[in-house]
Image: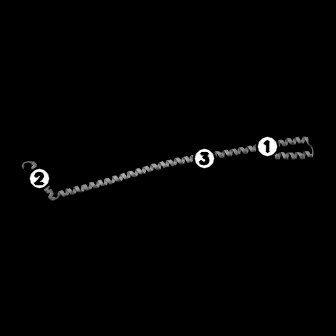
Amino acid sequence: MFAEPEFWVAVAFFILMAVFAYFGVHRTVLTTLDHRSERIKAELDDARRLKDEAAKLLEEYKARHASAEREAEDIIASAKADAERIASEAKAKMEDFVVRRTKTAESKIALAEAQALADVRAAAANAAVSAASSILSHSVKGQIADDLLAKGIAEVREKLN
């Protein structure tokens, strides 16, 4: 038993453990392990905290993204509504413009017709007056003829104009 190396390794191991126990190496090792455990625990806590913050930021960015998409959709819908409104206003203005132009043209046409009719009446009146004066001047003579002629011409002018 004393000749076997395993025995002496075991004796050396127990002596080494006794020396370690005497000098308090086990406390130092345990303290170091405790500190390392605390450091790892703190790192894990920091990692959890950072993970939670990252999850919160992700949710916040997702909410912002959804909000931005809704806002973009609202802007697009508003732009479409504005475009439709502007198009309908432009169409209404164009229709109003066409109606006004048509009325103006119709009134100009009516005015021209009235003027042409007045010109035709005036020409007819002048022709009738000329014809009446020439007929009356050939058939009636003297002062009576001149009075009748002037009176007839005045009446024809009044009635035809």
SS for tag 1?
A: helix
Viewed as shown, does residue 26 lie left or right of 128?
A: left
Q: Which of the marked residues, 3 or 2, is nearer the chain's N terminus?
A: 2
Residue 89: % across, % down = 58, 48
Secondary element type, mark 2: helix
**Which residue matches tag 2?**
12
Which numbered disc flags the more N-terminal residue, 1 or 3? 3
Quick check: marks 3 and 2 in contact, CB under 8 Å? Answer: no
Q: Which is more N-terminal, label 2 or label 1? A: 2
The total of numbered circles placed on residues is 3
Residue marked by disc 1: 121
Cα–Cα span, label 1 and label 3: 42 Å
Query: Residue placed at 43% from the left, 49% from the top?
Result: 66
Residue drawn at x 52%, y 48% as measured from the top left: 79
Residue at x 23% of width, y 56% of height: 34
Label 3 or label 2, whichever lies nearer to me, is 3
Q: CA distance from mark 1 to mark 2?
A: 150 Å
Quadrant of the image occupied by residue 122: top right
Report x, y in % for residue 133.
Answer: 87, 43
Q: In the structure shown, which secondary structural element does the residue marked by tag 3 occupy? A: helix
Q: Which residue is mark 3?
A: 92
What is the three-letter code of the residue carrying label 1? Arg
- Hey, what amino acid is under mark 3? Ala
Tags 1 and 3 touching, CB below 8 Å: no
- Look at label 2 and name its amino acid: Ala
